[in-house]
Image (cartoon, rainbow, N blue to C red):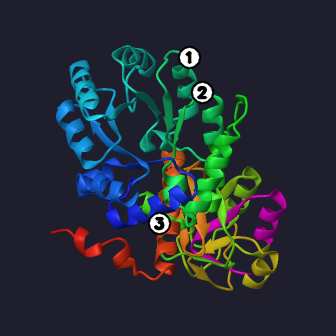
């Protein structure tokens, strides 16, 4: 339960238990937000369920274990980066108060070697955890899990981006515990999502490799699923082009930029760019004028035939009826009837500014009815994964609002306003 609101956490936890969850974790953000009341209230609401207090302790081990145990925790999670003396003291306190210690390998420099050492120290569980920020840049829990389980006798938990398929693979590769966060907590149907993962891990079978898509294919798939507002939120409200609209409502584009710099209706370079682009590309044009069109129906037909994903124009387009009949995604800042001439000024695949955003060849472009966002190619995978988390969060918020709460009530807005 990596949420900030205790009442929401208890409601979601109750739904997750109904779907087959065995343990419920009071996540670090929840504990920081609500203190030990997070553990107390979880235990009170779910008396027959084991409660994990994700303290991420690195110092004062005995004190924090005692605190969590007295609040009702059954398992206390610490960071494996803690000093051995801290861990040993925490284990002594755990034995005194009848709780178990789980060590989280999150960001450990040499996780395999550290897991061996934790095994010797006598901890109760070792958690192989690729954190959410590491997942955003391509980190994979299953790869690390396979290395750890061969080295230790301690039961191993797998955490970080776990869903139906990865949960099944985690168990098949030796995980004794599967820790699932966003794929249950942020679901509109928490009970149903938990039940699917429960069924997957209960029928995991023998180990088999889950074939992972390439990072590019995975991010394109995600960008097709999420909205431009989701992506803008993931970029901290950055990346959105200004004053641009979809000529064909309901059409979405996702692809890498082929850029064109041209001037006041000169359509030579815009048409030549079609010859260089192909499937997976979006042509992005700076025109320099809203009054003369460098793009029209014939160019649109050429793009459609070549399989180019779409076109974005900082400027005007014409032949709107033809473009709409072609059902092709075009985004522009104006519509006019008049075209310019093919003078050949400008260049292709240089850095440009389009609708207030810098666009470089290879940057990712996503457009839908809300507008167009530019995602720097170096951070595209990370932004895709973060946008997916935003979409999951909004899905859950929609469900809670549907049940009768207002948005401000769901997110406890007054509590979290900046003082």
Tag 2 residue: 174
**Sequence-first disc among 3 and 1:** 1
Disc 1 and disc 2 in contact, CB within 8 angstroms: yes
The answer to whether any part of residue 66 appears in the image is yes
Disc 2 and disc 3 in contact, CB within 8 angstroms: no
Residue 44: percent from left, percent from top: 33, 58
**Sequence-first disc among 2 and 3:** 2
Residue 389: percent from left, percent from top: 49, 56
Mark 2 and mark 3: Cα distance apart in space: 44 Å
Task: State the SS at label 2.
Answer: loop
Instruction: Identify which residue, 232 or 390, lies in the foreground.
Output: 390
Mark 3 and mark 1: Cα distance apart in space: 47 Å
Tag 3 residue: 240
Of tags 2 and 3, which is closer to the observer? 2
Magenta span includes 271: no
Above or below residue 37? Residue 297 is below
Residue 387: percent from left, percent from top: 51, 57
Q: Which residues are magenta?
A: 298-319
The quadrant of the image that shows the N terminus is bottom left
At label 2, counting other C-alpha atoms closer than 10 Å, the crowd grade (few under 14, some 14-19, many 20 or more) is some
Question: What residue is rendered at 56% in x and 31% in y?
Answer: 175
């Amino acid at each position: 339960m990596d949420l900030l609101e205790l009442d929401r956490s208890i409601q979601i936890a109750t739904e997750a238990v109904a779907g087959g969850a065995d343990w419920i974790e009071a996540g670090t953000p929840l504990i920081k937000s609500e203190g030990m009341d997070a553990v107390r209230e979880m235990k009170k609401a779910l008396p027959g369920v084991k409660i994990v207090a994700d303290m991420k302790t690195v110092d004062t081990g005995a004190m924090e274990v005692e605190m969590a145990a007295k609040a009702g925790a059954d398992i206390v999670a610490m960071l494996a980066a803690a000093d051995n003396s801290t861990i040993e003291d925490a284990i002594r306190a755990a034995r005194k108060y009848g709780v178990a210690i789980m060590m989280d390998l999150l960001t450990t420099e040499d996780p395999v070697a550290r897991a061996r050492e934790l095994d010797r120290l006598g901890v109760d569980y070792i958690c192989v955890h690729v954190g959410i920020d590491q997942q955003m840049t391509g980190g994979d829990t299953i790869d690390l899990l396979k290395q750890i389980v061969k080295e230790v006798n301690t039961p191993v938990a797998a955490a970080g981006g776990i869903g139906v398929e990865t949960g099944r693979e985690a168990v098949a590769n030796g995980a004794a515990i599967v820790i699932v966060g966003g794929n249950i907590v942020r679901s509109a149907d928490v009970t149903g999502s938990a039940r699917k993962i429960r069924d997957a891990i209960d029928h995991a079978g023998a180990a088999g490799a889950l074939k992972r898509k390439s990072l590019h294919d995975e991010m394109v798939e995600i960008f097709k699923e999420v909205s431009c507002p989701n992506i803008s939120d993931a970029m901290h409200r950055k990346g959105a082009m200004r004053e641009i609209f979809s000529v064909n409502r309901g059409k979405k584009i996702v692809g890498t930029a082929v850029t064109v710099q041209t001037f006041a209706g000169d359509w030579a370079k815009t048409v030549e760019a079609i010859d260089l682009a192909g499937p997976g590309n979006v042509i992005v044009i700076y025109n320099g004028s809203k009054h003369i069109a460098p793009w029209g129906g014939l160019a649109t037909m050429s793009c459609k035939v070549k399989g180019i994903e779409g076109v974005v124009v900082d400027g005007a387009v014409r032949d709107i009826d033809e473009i709409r009949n072609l059902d092709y995604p075009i985004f522009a800042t104006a519509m006019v009837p008049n075209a310019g001439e093919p003078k050949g000024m400008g260049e292709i695949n240089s850095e440009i500014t389009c609708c207030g955003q810098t666009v470089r060849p290879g940057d990712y472009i996503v457009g839908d009815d809300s507008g167009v966002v530019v995602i720097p190619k170096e951070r595209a995978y990370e932004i895709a994964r973060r946008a997916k988390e935003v979409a999951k969060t909004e899905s859950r918020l929609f469900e809670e609002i549907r049940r009768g709460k207002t948005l401000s009530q769901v997110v406890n807005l007054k509590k979290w306003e900046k003082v």
